[in-house]
Structure formats: structure tokens, C-alpha cells
Image: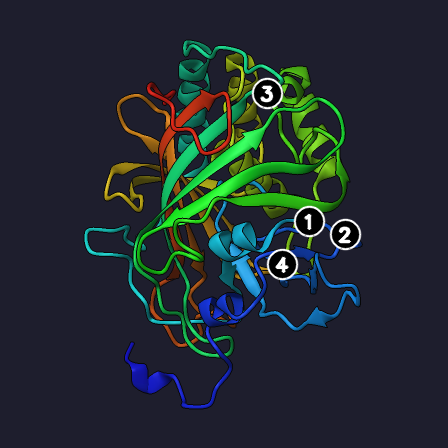
Amino acid sequence: MTTDNLRAGSARSEAEELLAASADWDLSSSRLLHYKDTLLRQIDHDDSASAERSPAPNRRRLPRLALALPAMSLGLVGALAIAASVGDRGSAPAGGPTASAPAQVNSATVTLGRIAAAAMKTDATPVKENQFVYVQRLARENKGAFSGPAVLGATHREEMWIAQKPGPSTTTGWLRSSGKDAIMPGQLLPITSTTSVRPGLWYPTYAWLASLPTDSDSLLKLLASQTTVEQGESEDEAVFRTIGDLLGSVIMPPATASALYKAVAKVPGITRIPDAVDAAGRHGIGITHSDVGSATRYVLIFDKDTLAYIGSQAYFISGGAKARGTKSDVLFGIDAVMERGVVDRQGEVPAKTTG
């Protein structure tokens, strides 16, 4: 793709739209935010007495990126979302994933069984209510113009500190991005909501995760009941991306993690990719789910040796509205989870991290 595809005077890029905005914007609390497969909600000024709204571009977001909340600060919105109304012949990054056909479904369920067994053998120290879960990741996101073709931005780093408070809270975490194409680089920004958020799917504390059923059928049913299915997508895809969000955003008890992988294995339509590459260039095993309705495909990537979750990819399906005319699926986002850990305050980086 060349810059000739971007017409002068066209809608501003996602980054330009966000950088022109106030740092304290919140998403409308009247609609739950789903970064992936959703239209970006109207954005309100937190500090504006008139609560004047500004139009925002359509976006998509990767699975297992930092978890979406009912309403969030601009920093998290800008750093994690990916424009939805774009398409491209864009290939994966150098050394990145191929668009080869996945293997049969049964190989995916067998692989997830191995991953679930490995998860049960991992150690996880419970996170205290006054602590934060720290997650650091690398990401490449769509920086193309609102109505133009996809343009993957530079790889940049994102750090999140997720609070663990047991009661309702309007500040559920903090975000800091750095590097080229990061939104508001170097600033430690609060993840805020205009209304109080309780621990749950949109505020996944360690204690809440520990309270989930460890029976995979019961867990899958619970997730399905709490997941919002966006227009044009199937319930299976909605559940798959919700699970992906959790995997990339938290530290969870081994029994919960194991049950979650077994639940993924029961989502219809999943397939295995022998070789998938994350944003850090690490090769792993991919578990993917395609959705004809939304013409998207998401990939969860696991380390080939440890079977730990390491990152994700997001594609527009070849032949779909956003990738029409292409011979292969179009990559529109990729990330890599680099570190996880527990700290006592926001902005602090753990000396030791949990894989």
C-alpha cells in the first residue's frame, strides 16, 4: 500500500483524531464498549460541563488486548482500538504469520486440551485487593485514515495496571504507552468510568476470576450470558473474542485458566494453525475462529514449548467487505504479551513477572 491511497483532505487518521482530543474523554456509559467488532462509541468530555459529544471513527480491536470496560479514558481507547472501516492488501509484518488454511477442528481441541493441562500446573499467587496486575505488551495497530485502507503503525509498547478493588470503582486501572505511533506517549493515564464498575467481565479482578465456575460447560454458559453480541457477528465469535480479551489482560488462578481453555475448545468453528507469529516475532501455535457474518478472523497464539498464551492477531477475511479483492486475509492488528506481574501501586514495574 502507498500513501497515494490516502487522499488529501480525507478523514483524519485514528491517531490524529485522538491526539486532537482531550485526555479525559470517556465513552458513553449507556453502551458497553467492545473494542473488537464494534463501532467506537460516542465520546464525551469528562471535564466538559456541556458534555458535548464528538464524532469518532469506527474501530476494531484485537482479542486479548487490554480488557474493555463500560467506559474508559481516552488513553486506553486510543491505544487499544483498531479502525473497523478499513481494508488492505496489507501482509503480516516481516517474519509474520501466513494466511495458510488452518488444520481440522479436532486438532484445535486436542491442542487446547494440552494447553488446559499445562495451565493447571502453573503457579499463581493470589493478588491482594490493594495491589495491581501489571501487563506489558507490544502492539501494531491500524493507523489508516477513517475511510481509507489499512496502514499498520509501528510496534509500540503498552503497559497496564489493573486495580483489584472489591467494590464499585470509577477508576479501574492505569495505562502508559511509549514508542512511535503510541497515543500520548509516556503519560500515565487513568482508566476511568463515568459510573462505578463492579468486578466482573468488564473489571476482571483476580478475586472475581477465582469465583468463576471451573466446569468448562458452566463457564462457557456464563460467559455467553454476559457477552454482548454485536451487530453482524455470531454469538460464537463474541464469546471467542471475550475469552481472548481475558487471556491478554489478567493473571488468573490455574483452575480458572484451565477451565477457560477447555471452554474455548467447545466454541464451534475453531481451528488450529501450526505456526503463528506475534508482534514480538515469536513463533507459536495459533487457535483461530472465523466469522462469516462480520468477515473477521481472530487468532490466539500460544508458546510451542510452554503452551502459555503469548499474543494475538486479527484479520479481515479475504473476500469480505473490508478485504474485497484480496487473495488472502488482511492483517489489521497484532500484539504480544511480554510481561505480567503484581505491584503495589500504579506506575510501578515488577522486579519479577509471571508468564
To which residue does mark 3 refer?
206
Locate residue 247, reporting x and y percent: 49, 32
Do callouts 2 and 1 mark residues in contact (Cβ within 8 Å)?
A: yes
Q: Quadrant of residue 214?
A: top right
Amino acid at dot 4: Thr
Residue 157: % across, % down: 35, 46
Distance of label 4 from label 3 (alpha carbons)? 27 Å
Mark 1 or mark 3: whose residue is earlier in sequence: 1
Is residue 66 among what the camera can see? no
Q: Are marks 3 and 2 in contact (CB under 8 Å)?
A: no
- Is residue 327 rendered to the left or right of residue 209? left
On screen, residue 99 versus residue 32, left or right, reads: left
Q: Is residue 69 above or below residue 149?
A: above
Mark 2 or 4, which is nearer the eye?
2
Residue sitting farthest toward the bottom: 8
Question: Which residue is label 4 attached to?
Answer: 38
Inter-mark Cα distance, 1 to 4:
14 Å
Q: Callout 2, which amino acid?
A: Ser
Q: Amino acid at mark 1?
A: Ala
Among numbered discs 1 and 4, the one appearing first in the sequence: 4
Secondary structure found at label 3: helix
- Neighbor class of circle 2 (other Cα within 10 Å; few <14, some 14-19, many 20+) is some
- Secondary structure beneath dot 1 equals loop
Q: CA distance from mark 3 to mark 2?
A: 24 Å
Side (left or right) of 53 relative to 344: right
Q: Residue at x 38, y 72 (%)?
A: 88
Q: Label 2: which residue?
A: 29
